[in-house]
Image (cartoon, rainbow, N blue to C red):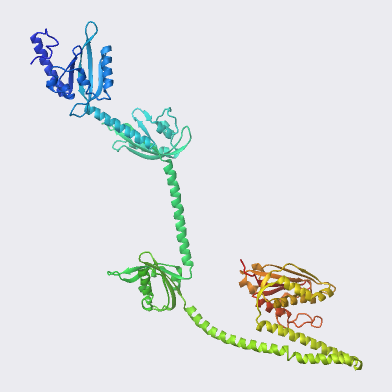
């Protein structure tokens, strides 16, 4: 085989050529083993000779490359992204004589792209013209791929760190050198230009976290430990004073002697998480307190309930049939009403403690409630072997999958009361019948009073008038006095019969009710009493009065009697002053016997006078017929007027009250319902 040096050095002696050829073969063998290729380019003839490694890398066969190929054959196989740069570097090396170095990708047919590193140099003739270009080329594909993977991993790590807004740190425990990323400095409130060391790191920690964090770092440096570092701490910005919560993670690395030589890791701002955690913790605490309060309130309500309440869970046999109930919860009413302790009921089975439920049907009702989900109620008589006996009213509601809540009351007393009420109702019916008969008798009396009793009076009055008018000259003074007394007694008797008739009619004769203006009623009454008011020189001060639902004639009787009394019972040498007003009644203004109606809307009409007055201890007597507090000889009347007032007020759904003081007048208060209260 012809030596590759024969063409370049034609005058070389054979022995020297053989030696060089042998050395070339040995070098080529070594280069092949190291994936190193060589090339030789005759610039003038543009022929490039390469060893087998070079031809393989560029995808050139041994036959095609045996006599050399143009440089472009090889440069055309360079990756398009790398080709311009490689061509430029070759041109620069040719022009300057400097060493040529380049790394690039080779794309050969039927092979994967390869990364190579080339190094070579040009040789020149005496005129400084390039004549040869030789060098070596190394296949660095594996190293380059590893480098690219490392760079990719580093970029991904950097991207992840940046995305998570994490900072990094690297500390050399042997030299004390500490390196922080800009983000780490930011989390300690420092500018990117700030210099850092371990003492500065400790100063940047919250005083309450400083010792604990330093101990965690020192533990990571201990031989035999894992070197892991995982801690949360607070920082107070050294320049901005801002408080931040930090999550730090790191790893210490040890040499063969077990000494930590590197400590590196990351830091992340978890301030928002901590704030959210604090808010969540507070809400959980508040909700827990609220639930505890609600549970306490519920328990309080249950225990305060007069009803007995038991929560139970069904007990089923192997076939799924409900055979009993476990009593889980019972309120105080259950405990007290059965004279038991809680452990005698809670946790026990229903039929063990209350076996009577099976016989009286309550048990079957509970089973239906669980099976159908529909609540039920029942009233049954209960009796068991332990002596519990009586009437019970129960209601049952399903709770959850297999539970039931039972509310029950012992209504034995109520049952007895119902029997007594039934008996009372019968007696009341009999009393009403008797009252009806009495009213009929009273009505008959009224008819007699209106006709039969008044007829003799009219005769007496007629005869006394004849004696007084026709025989006055023939009568002595004594006889005339007797005639006047007869007339006066007849007039009093007629007035009494008239008032009795009015009083009885209020009880026996219904009247039609409708809206009545009390202002109009009062106007009519004052018109009727105009002469008396003028004679007495009285002052009557009235305010606008409301309208009520009632009977105008009866209400006229009420006001006429009240005002007539105020005009009658006056102090000597004092003109009567009467004030009539109205306003919405307040609860504290109702009389004691009428307090049950204090929550309903009523008008209070007051008739106030400056007359005689009376001791209030006698106020109940003045509304009783024929009861008089003042001398009948001095003050006329039958003693029925105020009784009529009371009956009129009561027949309208109201009442009447009075307050008085001797010598300071009286105030009558009439309470009447408001029409259609809103």
User: Count the marks: how many?
Assistant: 0
Answer with left or right where residue 543 lies relative to residue 272.
right
- Does the rendering let one see residue 366? yes
Q: Position of residue 616 (x, y in %)?
A: 72, 75
Q: Residue at x 11, y 13 (%)?
A: 20
Residue 108, image quadrant: top left
Q: Is residue 449 left or right of residue 132?
A: right
Q: Whole-percent x and y of residue 383?
A: 40, 79
| Residue at the right extreme, as displayed | 473
Q: Nearer the viewer, residue 255 or 149?
A: 149
Q: Residue furthest top?
A: 126
Question: Does residue 398 appear to the left or right of 81 in the view shown?
Answer: right
Q: Residue at x 47, y 71 (%)?
A: 307
Q: Is residue 375 above or below residue 104?
A: below
Quarter of the figure with the N terminus: top left
Quadrant of the rendered structure where residue 308 is? bottom left
Q: Which one is in front, 73 or 269? A: 73
Name above or below for residue 289 compared with residue 10.
below
In which quadrant is the C terminus drawn? bottom right
Q: Position of residue 534 (x, y in %)?
A: 83, 73
Q: What is the residue that sits farthest to the bottom in this orientation? A: 474
Residue 259 appears in the picture as rendered: no
Q: Position of residue 285 (x, y in %)?
A: 45, 52
């Amino acid at each position: 085989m012809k030596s590759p040096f024969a063409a370049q050095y034609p005058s070389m002696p054979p022995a020297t050529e053989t030696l060089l050829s042998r050395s070339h073969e040995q070098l080529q063998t070594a280069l092949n083993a190291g994936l190193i290729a060589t090339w030789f380019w005759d610039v003038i003839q543009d022929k490039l000779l390469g060893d087998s490694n070079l031809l393989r890398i560029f995808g050139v066969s041994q036959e095609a490359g045996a006599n050399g190929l143009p440089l472009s054959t090889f440069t055309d196989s360079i990756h398009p992204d790398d080709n311009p740069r490689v061509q430029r570097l070759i041109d620069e090396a040719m022009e300057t004589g400097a060493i040529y170095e380049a790394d690039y990708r080779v794309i050969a047919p039927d092979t994967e792209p390869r990364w190579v590193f080339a190094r070579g140099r040009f040789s020149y003739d005496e005129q400084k013209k390039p004549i040869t270009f030789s060098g070596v080329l190394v296949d660095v594909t594996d190293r380059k791929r590893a480098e690219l993977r490392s760079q990719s991993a580093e970029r991904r790590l950097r991207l992840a760190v940046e995305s998570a807004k994490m900072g990094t740190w690297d500390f050399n425990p042997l030299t004390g050198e500490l390196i922080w990323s800009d983000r780490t400095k930011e989390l300690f409130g420092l500018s990117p230009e700030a210099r850092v060391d371990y003492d500065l790191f400790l100063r940047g920690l919250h005083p309450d976290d400083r010792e604990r964090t330093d101990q965690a770092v020192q533990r990571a440096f201990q031989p035999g430990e894992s070197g892991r570092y995982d801690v949360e701490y607070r920082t107070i910005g050294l320049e901005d004073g801002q408080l931040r919560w930090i999550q730090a993670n790191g790893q210490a690395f040890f040499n063969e002697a077990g000494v930590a030589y590197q400590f590196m890791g990351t830091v992340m701002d978890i301030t928002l998480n901590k704030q959210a955690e604090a808010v969540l913790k507070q809400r959980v605490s508040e909700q827990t307190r609220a639930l505890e309060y609600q549970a306490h309130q519920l328990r309080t309500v249950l225990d305060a309930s007069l009803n007995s309440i038991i929560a139970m869970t069904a007990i089923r046999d192997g076939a799924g049939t409900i055979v009993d109930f476990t009593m889980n919860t019972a309120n105080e009413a259950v405990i007290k009403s059965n004279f038991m302790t809680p452990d005698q009921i809670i946790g026990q089975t229903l039929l063990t403690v209350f076996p009577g439920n099976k016989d009286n049907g309550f048990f079957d009702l509970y089973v239906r409630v669980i099976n159908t989900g529909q609540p039920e109620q029942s009233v049954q008589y209960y009796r068991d072997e332990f002596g519990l006996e009586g009437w019970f009213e129960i209601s049952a509601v399903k709770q959850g999958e297999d539970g039931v809540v039972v509310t029950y009351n012992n209504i034995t007393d109520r049952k007895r009361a119902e029997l007594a009420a039934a008996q009372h109702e019968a007696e009341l019916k009999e009393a009403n019948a008797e009252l009806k008969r009495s009213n009929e008798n009273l009505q008959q009396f009224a008819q007699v009073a209106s006709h039969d009793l008044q007829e003799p009076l009219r005769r007496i009055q007629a005869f006394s008038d004849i004696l007084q008018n026709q025989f006055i000259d023939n009568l002595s003074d004594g006889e005339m006095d007797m005639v006047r007394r007869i007339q006066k007694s007849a007039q009093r008797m007629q007035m009494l019969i008239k008032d009795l008739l009015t009083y009885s009619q209020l009880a026996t004769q219904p009247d039609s009710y409708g809206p009545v203006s009390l202002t109009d009623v009062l106007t009519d009454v004052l018109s009727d009493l105009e002469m008396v008011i003028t004679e007495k020189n009285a002052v009557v001060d009235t305010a606008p009065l409301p309208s009520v639902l009632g009977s105008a004639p009866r209400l006229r009787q009420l006001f006429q009697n009240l005002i007539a009394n105020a005009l009658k019972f006056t102090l000597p040498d004092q003109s009567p002053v009467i004030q009539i007003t109205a306003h919405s009644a307040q609860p504290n203004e109702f009389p004691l016997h009428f307090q049950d109606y204090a929550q309903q809307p009523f008008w209070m009409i007051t008739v106030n006078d400056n007359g005689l007055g009376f001791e209030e201890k006698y106020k109940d007597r003045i509304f009783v017929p024929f009861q008089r507090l003042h001398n009948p000889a001095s003050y006329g009347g039958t003693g029925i007027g105020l009784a009529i007032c009371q009956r009129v007020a009561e027949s309208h759904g109201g009442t009447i009250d009075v307050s008085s003081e001797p010598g300071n007048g009286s105030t009558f208060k009439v309470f009447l319902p408001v029409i259609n209260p809103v």
